Amino acid sequence: MKWGSDFKLNSSEECCRACKEMCEGDNGPCLCDSWVFCGNKQDCGSRFGECWLKKQKDALDPDWRDSGDKVIWTSGLVFGKGELLSLQHCAGCQFYRAESRGNSWDLQGNHIEHAPYGPPYALIQGTVDAYGTVFKDIPQEACPTIRRGSIAWVGSGPDFFISLANHHEWKKAYTVFGQVLPEDMEIVEKISQLPTIPDVWSNVKVAVLERPVPLRFIRMRKSP
């Protein structure tokens, strides 16, 4: 859209605003959906102030070259309101952890006598922390114990999990806000079998998905 070598601004805010101005109103398409700015005078040198305005092939899965503390560029994404609504996509929402029932729970989610309670912990975990939004903490509530198919918040959100087993050992520690239909649990089971990487969170062994699974949402129509 615009070459940074020919388009220089004073701040990342100005660069972002320039990209937003290429959107056709609140509900129209955005000719620019991503921007990159070089804002450190010492590190950027002659490239200081360069503002590159771009159009991604898929703004929900943007191209990127590098990340980390040594990167001198600041970047961001821009969406038209109408675009996000039509996409039914929660940018940044994804499943990132997957652990099967292992040898501790049977197909119905019942715990096998004398078996350990994990790992693996028979769940898939994700987040609804969408890019560009501020998540409002969910009040914790007294709820039933976790059963196979339960959908519950981790703390006050935005992370959540879907259980593949009946976790009576967790008592009422999590706020349950939904339930997966029994006929759809096959999908959850398939996600739990995807390739993972071992990791340790607060001294707990977990399995993190090699490739997170993105989430899409559809608002269901209420029955008349």
Image: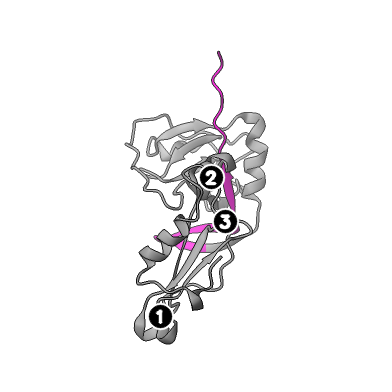
> Magenta region: which residues?
199-224
What is the number of callouts on the image?
A: 3
Dividing the picture into quadrants, the one containing residue 47 is bottom left
Q: Earlier in the sequence, mark 2 or mark 1?
A: 2
Colour pattern: one colour
Name the mark on residue 28: 2
Three-letter amino acid code of the residue under disc 2:
Gly
Residue at screen point 57% across, 34% down: 218
Task: State whether residue 197 appears in this view.
Answer: yes
**Separation of marks 2 and 3 at Cα, in angstroms:** 15 Å
The residue carrying mark 1 is 48
Where 11 falls versus 40 (above or below)?
A: above
**Which of 25/207 is in front?**
25
Kindly report the secondary structure that dominates the magenta region of the rendered protein. Answer: strand
Where 23 falls versus 68 (above or below)?
A: above
The residue carrying mark 3 is 59
Neighbour tally class for label 1: few under 14, some 14-19, many 20 plus, Cα within 10 Å: many
Q: As drawn, which residue projects farthest toward the top?
A: 224
Three-letter amino acid code of the residue under disc 1:
Phe
Q: Earlier in the sequence, mark 1 or mark 3?
A: 1
Q: Nearer the viewer, mark 1 or mark 3?
A: 1
Neighbour tally class for label 2: few under 14, some 14-19, many 20 plus, Cα within 10 Å: some
Question: Which image quarter is the C terminus in?
Answer: top right
**Which of 216/117 is in front?**
216
Residue at screen point 41% across, 86% down: 45
Secondary element under disc 1, as helix, strand or loop, is loop
